[in-house]
Amino acid sequence: MSDPIVVAEGLHKRFGDTHALRGLDLSVPAGSVCGVLGPNGAGKTTMVRVLATLADPDEGGARIAGFDVVREADQVRARIGLAGQYAAVDEKLTGRGNLRMFGRLYHLSRREAHRRADELLERFGLMEAADRQVGGYSGGMRRRLDLIASLILRPLVLFLDEPTTGLDPRSRGEIWDSIRELVADGTTVLLTTQYLDEADRLADDIAVVDHGRVIATGTPDQLKATIGDRVDVVLERPDDARAAASVLGGLAGAEALVTAADRLSVPLRGGSLRLADVVRELDRAGIAAADVGLRRPTLDEVFLRLTERQKESV
């Protein structure tokens, strides 16, 4: 894995009585996608603002590509891009006009700003709409334009703060494709999102943030492994649920959870339980199963488990 290009150590940030960041640590390898998950108010956006030099930490420090976000903020800004939760483009301008404007704001020459705008419009599939007013764009097109506006200077690191909020599935897919293209070209992406399927599909690593701290890190598969696989059973007779729970609990050495009137789920311990064992023992007990299956936990379950533990410890 590459050396970290984004490093945060012991970040604290307060807003009056609100302690938004409480010693947050983060390390993101170059050329990867880091998905940042957390409930509302967990500190995700504050973290992005500090890393993007939009807010100074009260304590701790952070570096982007080796540059300190406070002492060397100008150097950091020259190497990052940022797309927030809401499109920052001007609806009265055309798509091409917006990108040219951003290029000039980034101090590109007029010629270079025009060339870069056309290059990005072509690459991200907006050339046909380039000369239409942005006010007539769909939500997905507007968000895509906002995303590529952050790429005018070819950033080493791109911060995306909930970039697909409110988009339909097709538009979300288009944004995902754009992000994959950027990473293939070497850009490091730090993505905050409340869509766990988004993090599961895009992120190389995930950091779960709650109460201003990173409470867990790992690949999606590593985080899922902290819960482990489960065996799900659908019963033909709901009245058998209690007896089935007893059988499954005895087999797995763990409590079986009744998830619906006719459905149970039990965690696997060390991979020792086989589906054939479940079917055989249920049959011996006279319990008819309509379906027995092995299921990996979802990222949603991991997220809920981790944040619930954090809530109990606070």
Image: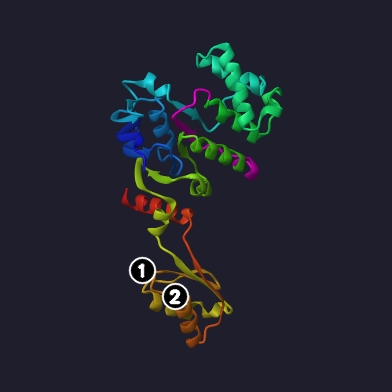
| Residue 75 picture location, percent across and down | 38, 20
- Amino acid at pointer 2: Arg
Residue 25 numbered mark, or none: none
Give 56 or 35, whichever is nearer the viewer: 35
**Residue 168 vs residue 215: left or right?**
right
Q: Quadrant of residue 74?
A: top left
Q: Quadrant of residue 141?
A: top right
Give 43 or 167, whichever is nearer the viewer: 167
| Residue 159 picture location, percent across and down | 46, 32
Q: Secondary structure at mark 1?
A: loop
Label 1: how many Cα within 10 Å (few below 14, some 14–19, many 20+): few
The residue beneath circle 2 is: 274
Residue at point 33%, 20% (across, down): 72
Instruction: Assess whether residue 103 is covered by the magenta stretch.
Output: no
Spatial CA distance of label 1 from label 2 is 11 Å
Q: Is residue 269 above or below residue 147?
A: below
Q: Secondary structure at mark 2?
A: loop
- Amino acid at pointer 1: Gly
**Is residue 305 visible to us here?**
no
**Residue 3 vs residue 220: left or right?**
left
Give 200 or 3, whichever is nearer the viewer: 3
Instruction: Assess whether residue 154 is covered by the magenta stretch.
Output: yes
Residue at point 60%, 22% (across, down): 117
Q: Which residues are magenta?
A: 152-172
Q: Quadrant of residue 71?
A: top left
| Residue 204 picture location, percent across and down | 44, 46
Residue 270 numbered mark, or none: 1
